């Protein structure tokens, strides 16, 4: 098992140029002859924020309350990593099938295809994250030492996205309807993840269920640390008194992300010999 992982790492290290070229190819294809150019990187996050704003306006009207600036800031902050994860699933899942000529005719570690898709999506989301970082101060979000949690959470999300990309791209070769399952998740997953709404708004039981989704836990961790200035090593309670965050969530996300990448890489590597006949 460790030997397989060492072999994967060695092959990827030797294929740095291929990874670089495939990532550049994906970025160029995405923006070639695009009217809006890099503005496309902001389209999904902006759509999520507008949808969330509409939902919260409806709730505010019913309850007779106003929407606070920190609620809008939380949605904006969570929209970018959610868009990154969705984009990774959309691009990595078909990456092996859509590169049939490469998979069947040229030898290289096939892991570079979903990895290149994730890296290209990272470029897109980095642009959007820079814009959000500029906008947050105008939404009354001030800097604090707790912002240092953001790089860790974003790194865990990146690892989780790569793990999902490796597994789904491989599974899509064996079962071609996997891509349709991914489309269903992308469509309805936003309602099972605290993106438009905060986990606390679902009550004590709903909040715990939301946090079972590792992506949801990452997004809530970002909001609580960057916008609300909470330490993720402390228990955080909602105004109603129930727990919305505890340090165990951070450990849970780390285990799922790193363990998922470990298992997905092994599954991908051991299935790789059958790719040419399946694609």
Image (spheres, rainbow, N blue to C red):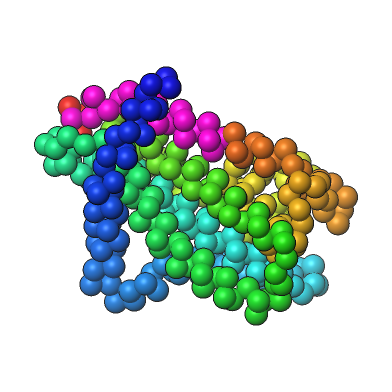
Quarter occupied by residue 179: top left
- Residue at 46% across / 63% down in the picture? 126
- Residue at 54% across / 38% down in the picture? 257
Relative vertical location of residue 75 with respect to residue 208 in this rendering, above or below: below
Q: Is 181 one of the magenta-colored residues? A: no
Of 227 and 190, nearer the camera is 227
Res. 237 visible in picture? yes
Q: Give the left or right position of residue 244, taking residue 78 as reference.
A: right
The N terminus lies in which quarter of the figure? top left
- Residue at 26% across / 35% down in the picture? 109
What's drawn in magenta, residue-wise? 256-276
How many marks can you see? 0
Residue occupying the far bottom of the picture:
138
Q: Give the left or right position of residue 277, taking residue 143 as reference.
A: left
Q: Main secondary structure of the magenta part?
A: helix
Of 279 and 187, nearer the camera is 279
Q: Give the left or right position of residue 119, taking residue 243 as reference.
A: left
Residue occupying the far left of the picture:
105
The C terminus lies in which quarter of the figure? top left
Residue occupying the far right of the picture:
241
């Amino acid at each position: 098992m460790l030997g397989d992982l060492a072999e994967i790492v060695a092959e990827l290290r030797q294929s740095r140029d291929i990874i670089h070229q495939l990532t550049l190819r994906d970025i160029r294809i995405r923006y070639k002859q695009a009217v809006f150019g890099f503005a496309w990187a902001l389209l999904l996050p902006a759509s999520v924020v507008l949808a969330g704003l509409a939902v919260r306006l409806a709730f505010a009207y019913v309850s007779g309350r106003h929407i606070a600036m920190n609620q809008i800031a939380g949605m904006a902050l969570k929209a970018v990593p959610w868009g990154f994860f969705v984009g990774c699933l959309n691009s990595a899942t078909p990456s092996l099938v859509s590169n049939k000529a490469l998979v069947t005719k040229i030898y290289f570690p096939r892991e570079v295809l979903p990895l290149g898709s994730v890296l290209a999506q990272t470029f897109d989301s980095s642009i959007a994250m820079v814009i959000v970082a500029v906008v947050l101060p105008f939404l009354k979000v001030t800097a604090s030492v707790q912002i240092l949690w953001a790089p860790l959470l974003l790194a865990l999300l990146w690892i989780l996205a790569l793990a999902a990309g490796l597994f789904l791209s491989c599974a899509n070769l064996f079962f071609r309807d996997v891509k349709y399952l991914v489309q269903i998740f992308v469509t309805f997953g936003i309602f099972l993840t605290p993106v438009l709404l905060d986990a606390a708004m679902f009550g004590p039981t709903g909040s715990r269920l939301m946090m079972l989704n590792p992506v949801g836990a990452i997004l809530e961790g970002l909001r609580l640390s960057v916008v609300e200035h909470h330490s993720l090593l402390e228990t955080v309670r909602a105004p109603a008194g129930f727990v919305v965050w505890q340090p165990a969530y951070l450990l849970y996300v780390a285990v799922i992300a790193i363990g998922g990448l470990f298992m997905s890489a092994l599954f991908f590597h051991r299935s790789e010999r059958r790719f040419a006949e399946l694609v």
